[in-house]
Each structure stands twice: as C-alpha cells, then as structure tokens.
Amino acid sequence: MHSMFGESLARSWWVLMLYGVISVLFGLSALVWPGTTVIALTWAFGIMALAEGITSILALFNRDVRISKALLFVYAVASIIFGLLGIFHPAVVASVLLVFLGAWLVVAGIYRILLAIRIRKHIKGEWMIALSGVLAIVLGVLFVGYPAAGLLTLAIWIGAAALIYGILQIVASLQLRKLSHLAV
C-alpha cells in the first residue's frame, strides 16, 4: 500500500465482508422464500415512503424550503398514503405496482416496434429492437395477467442478483484482507 487511503481501505476489509455476507443471506432467502421477500421489500419501501412523508410534513414548517408548500404537501400526503398501504397491505401494493410495470412494458414494447420500423432503412439489426419490443409486450402482458407469478419471478431475480453481488463483495473483501497483511 502506498497511500494512507489505501491502507485504511485495506484495514476495513471486514466491512465489505459484512456487506457480502448480508447480501448472500438475503439472496438465498429471496430464492428460497420469494413470496416473503416481495412482502418484506414492499414493507421496507412502505417504511421509507412513510418516513419521507413525515419528513416532508415537517419541512412544511421550515421557512427556508425552496419548493411550493402546496406541492410539498401533496407529496407528503401521497408518500404517507403509499407508506401506510405498503406497510399494512404489502401484497396488494406489490401487485398493483407490478400491473403498472406491466402496462408500461406494453407501451414500451409498442414504441420499440414502431421505432424499429421507422429506422429500418438507416441501420442494420433493427429486428433486434423490434424483438426487444415484442419481448417487452409479452412480459408486460404476463405481469398484468399473472401478477403473483410476476412478483415471485422478480423476487427470484432480485435474489440471484443479491447472491452474485454478495459473492463479489466477499471476494473483494478477501483481496483487501490480503493487502492489509502486506501493509503490516
């Protein structure tokens, strides 16, 4: 290690290890219990939205706020309502959000197909853009038609990503740990 920053980073290898282990545990739990994971994530988003809403309500009483008080009030109320719904009805909120995601995917798919048709004379491989549009439409229709299956699928993908992220964090922490032994 040539710098104090590098030495400090190497000595804190255990922080990356902790992040990695937590991420691996989360990833494994999401893969084993995807339904519970969806509920837990929606509940966590509900808590964050509720906290944001309460903070925004408190900001209404601050004279230094540079945003419209009416807009801040609307945002605060919407955050509080979403937060409470997420906490007390997480499955419903998750399903509704997935239906919105599905609708957006259908619109995005149609857009991509139309874009591919419009630019087909200007680029090669426009069929890939059209294919991505078709796949987006199929996924969107599946999400709207089968929200429970879509939620479980998303939880599994999130779990797989968290698992990979955690493994990478653990590997990085072990590399930093080696550097900390070299610095001594």
Image: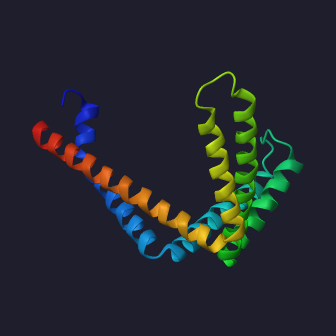
Q: Residue at x 25, y 50 (%)?
A: 171
> Of residues 118 and 47, which is closer to you in this image?
118
Q: Is residue 137 visible?
A: yes
Q: Which residue is drawn at 65% across and 67% down?
A: 46
Q: Is residue 12 visible?
A: no
Which residue, as the protein is rendered here, is positioned at the far right? Answer: 70
Q: Which residue is drawn at 55% across and 63% down?
A: 154
Quadrant where the C terminus is found in the figure = top left
Quadrant where the N terminus is found in the figure = top left
Percent position (x, y) of residue 143? 67, 64
> Of residues 163 and 140, which is closer to you in this image?
140
Which residue, as the protein is rendered here, is positioned at the far top? Answer: 122
Answer with the quarter of the image where residue 78 lies: bottom right
Number of callouts = 0
Answer with the quarter of the image where residue 79 lies: bottom right
Q: In this view, does 112 lie above or below 39?
A: above
Percent position (x, y) of residue 151? 59, 68
Q: In this view, does 24 lie above or below 5?
A: below
Q: In this view, does 41 lie to the left or right of 1?
A: right
Percent position (x, y) of residue 117? 73, 34
Report the colour scheme: rainbow
Q: Is residue 117 left or right of residue 9?
A: right
Q: In this view, does 86 lie to the left or right of 39?
A: right
Percent position (x, y) of residue 123? 63, 24
Q: Residue at x 81, y 61 (%)?
A: 77
> Of residues 87 and 31, which is closer to you in this image?
31
